[in-house]
Amino acid sequence: MSSQDFLRRMPKTGIGFRRRDRIAQRFHIDFVLLFLLMGIASFGMLVLYSASSSSLLAIQKQGTFFVIAFVSMFVVAQVPVDLMRRAAPWVYIGGVALLVLVFFVGIGAKGAERWLGVGSIRFQPSEIMKLAMPITIAAFLSRQFLPPRFIHIIITLALIAVPTALIIEQPDLGTSILVMVSGMVVLFYAGLQWRYIILAIAGFGASLWPIWHYMMHEYQQKRVLMMLDPESDPLGAGWNIIQSKTAIGSGGLDGKGWLEGTQSRLDFLPEGHTDFIIAVMSEEFGLLGVILLIIAYILVIARGMYIAINAQDSFGRLLAASISTTFFVYVFVNMGMVAGMLPVVGVPLPFISQGGTAIVALMSGFGILMAIATEQKRVMTPQN
Amino acid sequence: MFENHHFKDHQREARMFKIRLGMMVAIMALLFCVLIYRYYNLQIVNHLEYATQSEHNRVHVEPIAPTRGIIYDRNGEVLADNRASFTLSLVVNKTMNLDATLSVLRTLVDISPVDLEKFYKLKKQQIHPLDPIPLRYRLSEEEIARLAVNEFRLEGVQVDAELVRYYPYGDLFAHTIGYVSRINETEQQKFSEEQLRRYSGTHSIGKTGIESSYEDVLLGEVGSKNVETNARGREIRVLDRNDPKQGKNVTLNIDFKLQQQAAITLAGRRGSVVAIDVKTGGILTAVSNPGFDPNLFVTGIGFNDYKNLNESPDTPLINRFIQGQFPSGSTIKPMMGLAGLHYGTTDAERTISDPGYFMLPGSSHKWGDWSLRALGRGHGSVNLKKAIAESCDTYFYDLAVRTGVDRLHEFGVKFGLGNRTGIDIPNERPGVWPSREWKRAKKKEAWYPGDNVNMGIGQGFVSVTPLQLAVMTATIASRGDRYRPRLVKAIDGVEVAPILEEHTEAKKEHWDAVYDGMLSAVYDPGGTLTRYKLGLGADYQIAAKSGTAQVINIAQGAKYVIGSLKVEHRDHVLFVGFAPVDDPQIAIAVILENDDHLKTSENPSLLARTLFDAHLRGLYRPAGEPIHGFPAPKPTTAAPVTTEAPVEPEHSESPDHLPEAPVFSD
């Protein structure tokens, strides 16, 4: 019997707990996160209603996904952190296997094969990888002496490279970036030596040319070029960016008002309900809305970092920090690309964009955070 | 698996983690600042630019076509109207796949090969890539419904209600009113800025006839509306609207019922009829037969339809009464007589002795008289009245030589010969009323005395349009007032003042003498029209003159045998006349082409009689009804129709300076 189990089973250790904390502990829920996420989700439904041309059906679907997502978050939160660590290799192997399977029986959408169908349910194995990756890397590195030695860095990079390459090949640039980032940040948090970091940045710079020529599809190259000069093809590849910038810019300080965004409601924004939904939000709620949403995201990330700092061991720390940082990357890449700062790579805006599996995967990630958070409380509280 | 766990320095790892976390938080904070700055830049700094851009996206100014003015006859009968028509158009740039869209459309509406042919032709001429190209006009209710149901899979397809010109009487007014048709590329390129604006909502423009010459009046003033459109160009709602001004309505001098009467009587024959209001120059009737259906042109005529019209030997597209140029034949004899009286080269009493031919002093060439060929003798002793009544060629050969080309030219011009009459429709031709200058310029030859001879009976170089004949006759009927012939009587109810081009002063007894001759032609025994009983049963008097215009030259010594020539080589039969003689109201010119072996009942004079009756007495006759409504004609009293071939006059010689062929006229 470990010391944790011992403390957990001691009667009356929770005497000093406030009622909320007791419930939180019993159900492994972090209420701060929960309320923040529910707030963002509700606001997201509001924006989606407008972005989908007042379609109640879209809201119903998205609502259903949110219910599923919150349930799965709740379920994941109940999984002992230790079990996650131990299960990590199997989750990783399973995830990679599914990614390979996509190549053979994948279902396509818009020229990319990303989906697996089981009965009437379709899901993207790459979404599983978004969770499997940080867990695996965190599990692997947390059992090593930190900062990691060279051999462990190599193994880590190999573990990151395999699924990333598989996802790029689907091709799904956005997800592969997120999966890679979720692994790489673990390495960073684990104390990756600066010399490697500098080396990596230099190496990345040097490898841009071969990546551009040999690894990127023509449509991806076009997107990067379009980001640099969207006006060059205003009716073709530049259309999305020009229209989204127009939508954002025309919103002004306080926006045109809910359901009043002409760019989106008159169909000038392609993908206005998915990746480009921030343009709809910006048009209707203005800069104030944007800042408010960013504050909400910052609070979520801050809460994640708080959980990471207070995690009881390296695994929890690394995993929580990785999930929070990846969440930031989601937000930054999406808002950056829609505003014409970054290439359009197909990253949804968390909890606002329409899309089932992404929401479920994200919420499950927060389930992991909650598991880490509530585990730590059980340990820390009696010592106070 | 976790063998290293117990030897790890947890304190150190946690401390290092905190440092790394701090760094990451700093990076995130920085990136969030960049992000917020970017949005600030877009939404605050450049807000106006993007707001304007968004408004441009949203709102489009669309022109609203004005309703084209309606064309009425003098009694308010609608001759050209606008009908609501639903048009299916394609914006090719907005269709995903043109062929696929077309094949879907074919399952929904009836699209003929002609429609497709027109569509592709217009597509080639397309000026603006987002202009809708019409594919099918006059959609039925059912087709509209089917299109509406399938709208979602028809990107770039639109159905517009537009007013399309409609000519309820088809070919009856094809040559007077003309037609509108789609503005073509050449016309569009010639447009000024102002015209581009005025036609921004209009697809059609008047191409011929009244539709063309009164285009500015009929068009109206374009309106506009601000519409909110979505990214696919579909109109969501109208924000504000500036109504167009309807084009002005035009009332014609044309009398619809008279025109119809003329068309009934002319049916099946090539020719034309013009009737003019003597007091104003207003054109009461103008028919060119055969006509065509102008409605074919409104939405763009198909290749085969056009080819058939254009290549028909009957040339339906030619407007005969202003574009057909024929020798006037004897119809100018009253005017020639008046010229002789006016210049004192003859008088009412002077008689000549007609042997059946005319010879110039010092020449042996004989210009034959028609009577020599038809009856084997001359007219005997002839004065002016008899010369007009019996159409004595010899008298007028002589008179023309006496008067001379200079004075004849001067006088004929006063009656509208040799110049465009100035009728208010385009493409009129001037004909030829020769002069010394004209011959020198055109033929590079001097004027020979023999040219005078031919001019005396309206042959040789003389050519006239039926309209010119009508104007000449109206000028005689009004004793010298030549009005500019006009189709339009009023614009938006405001009468257009008649234009008196010229007044020819002549003595009353000169006019009376000419009238006497023209009356004698109708009523006296020996008159060329007497046998047709032109005036029978009418309570008013008709003054008239017949004529024959030779189409080809008959070789020396050959005989002109009726019916032996190819149709297109046969003579034209002409008529001019006015009524009532005591107070002339209406002057008529008729020409029937290549139609010399007519039955008595088909003589152009009787066609004119129906128009006199209709106009003066309101008596309209259905097709096939005998011309002489009351009393019934008595066939036994009618002079036998001359069926024997006219005899070619014998000529001893034919000097080369003389006209290419002998000429004669009845």
Image: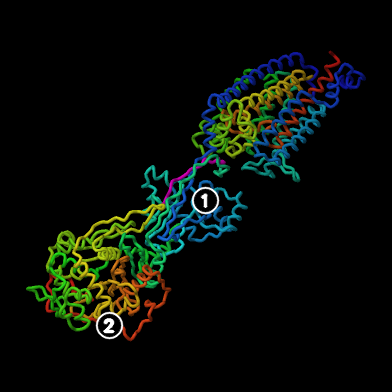
Between the C-alphas of marks 2 and 1, the distance is: 65 Å
Residue B469 picture location, percent across and down: 27, 65
Tell me the element at label 2. Answer: loop
Residue A187 picture location, percent across and down: 68, 23
Going from the N terminus, do you reach mark 2 or mark 1 first? Answer: 1
**Residue B260, picture quadrant:** bottom left
Q: How many marks?
A: 2
Q: Can you tell which of label 2 and label 1 is closer to the viewer?
A: 2
Residue B90: assigned label: 1
Residue B642: assigned label: 2
Query: Pointer 1: residues within 10 angstroms few (<14), some, or many (20+)?
Result: many
Tell me the chain of label 1.
B
Are both tags, 2 and 1, on one chain?
yes
Tell me the chain of label 2.
B
In the image, taking residue A348 as reference, residue B51 lies left or right, namely left
Q: Quadrant of the image for the N terminus of chain B? A: top right
**Magenta segment boundaries in residue numbering:** B218-230
**Residue B179, picture quadrant:** bottom left
Q: Nearer the viewer, residue B633 or A239?
A: B633
Q: Residue furthest bottom?
A: B636
Kindly identify the amino acid type of the residue bearing the numbered disc 1: Leu
Q: Is residue B100 above or below residue A368?
A: below
